[in-house]
Amino acid sequence: MISATMNPTFQTLFGFSPVVSARAPGRVNLIGEHTDYNGGFVLPIATPQGTAVELGLRPGDRVCVHSVNVPAAERTRGYELGAECHTGTWVDYVAGVTASLREHGHPVGGFNLRIDSTLPLGGGLSSSASLEVALLRALNVLFQLELDSLEIARIAHRAETGLVGAPVGIMDQMAASIASETRALFLDAQTLSFEQLPLPDGCGLIVIHSGTTHTHAAGEYRVRRAECDEAARLLGVTELRDVSVAMLRGANLPPPLDRRVRHVVTENARVLRAREALRVSNATELGRLMNESHDSMRDDFEVSTPDIDMLVELAQADPRVFGARLTGGGFGGSIVALAQRNSAASSASAIAAAYAERSPSRPTVLIP
């Protein structure tokens, strides 16, 4: 339990009550990993966990930010509007938003901001997009910007790919802006067309954080993005979305680019089949596709880890689970499983307990 002193209110921090508050959810991606930045298809759903922000006006161009989710010594940060720069710290996600707003023709004035999130940072549930969208929703009201949900997603995406420098696709920001907790969001990342689809009858989700975290702004995620871009160049296409199965068979790409492209092409096909499975409420087929997706991420895209593989295998071994996979960019984070709704909680507890016995990492059941 965090004491009031450790977790001060907006009033305590800034001396007056907030003018605006807003919230945005995280997301769990059911299937369709590393396809959005290749112009492909994804199928996320919003989480009950999310990010809440409180804002108040501040004279001048100063932004003062306090987050309760980082170590005490790092909780309060500030910067000047118009002078946003990459610092490599959490405040970049806030500065990225104000810089992106200005770039899109929506400059704002100074403000005070308090952030409180129930999402695990680096857990594969898109805590960064949740913050970006929540902040944009609040700024939209505070400064009467008249942004719609799609504009918010686009501005939030630019915040992360711009100042933050993370080479991500737009799935996370779209999910945080328009997804719901009860219906999966089928999204075409190339056109931004989307469709809301219910989960199969009698099914619920299990999401378990492995206890290991990742970052998208550096490391192997960036390498995978570069590999996809190089493969697209060699194949003569703008995005790997445009590579057909026939092209894949006839391509002579060097390893590991051949495996990276195979994952993207087959994953896009799996998402399209998953959409059809949702349309007819076929839990068995959706679970099978989720299992295949994890195999592809593990073997072809190589973004899983031994701990994640163990957690997925434990979930897949539960007879009440239809399928399970790594969710998010990989290299740690969380898994998602489709299970019988009335036994999802007990399955999740059993899977987490078995994992805790075998791994030094500490699991956390996030859903249900």
Image: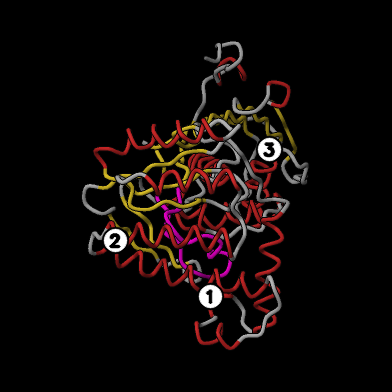
Q: CA distance from mark 1 to mark 2?
A: 22 Å
Per the rendered image, the range of residues in magenta is 28-46
Q: Is residue 356 above or below residue 338?
A: above
Sequence-first disc among 3 and 2? 3
The residue pinned by badge 2 equals 278
Residue type marked 3: Trp
Tell whether 235 sits left or right of 170: right
Q: Quarter-wise, where is residue 59 in the image?
A: top right
- Name the front one of labels 3 and 1: 1
Is residue 339 a member of the stretch shown in magenta? no
Q: Quarter-wise, where is residue 279 in the image?
A: bottom left
Q: Position of residue 212 (x, y in %)?
A: 61, 38
Within-10-Å neighbours for mark 3: few <14, some 14–19, many 20+:
some
The structure residue drawn at horizontal position 64% and vertical position 27%, both measured from the top left corner, is: 66
The residue pinned by badge 1 equals 241
Within-10-Å neighbours for mark 2: few <14, some 14–19, many 20+:
many
- Name the front one of labels 3 and 2: 2
Considering depth in this image, is 233 or 196 the residue closer to the camera? 233
Q: Is residue 143 visible?
A: no
Residue type marked 1: Arg
The residue pinned by badge 3 equals 90
Q: Secondary structure at mark 3?
A: loop
Q: Secondary structure at mark 1?
A: helix
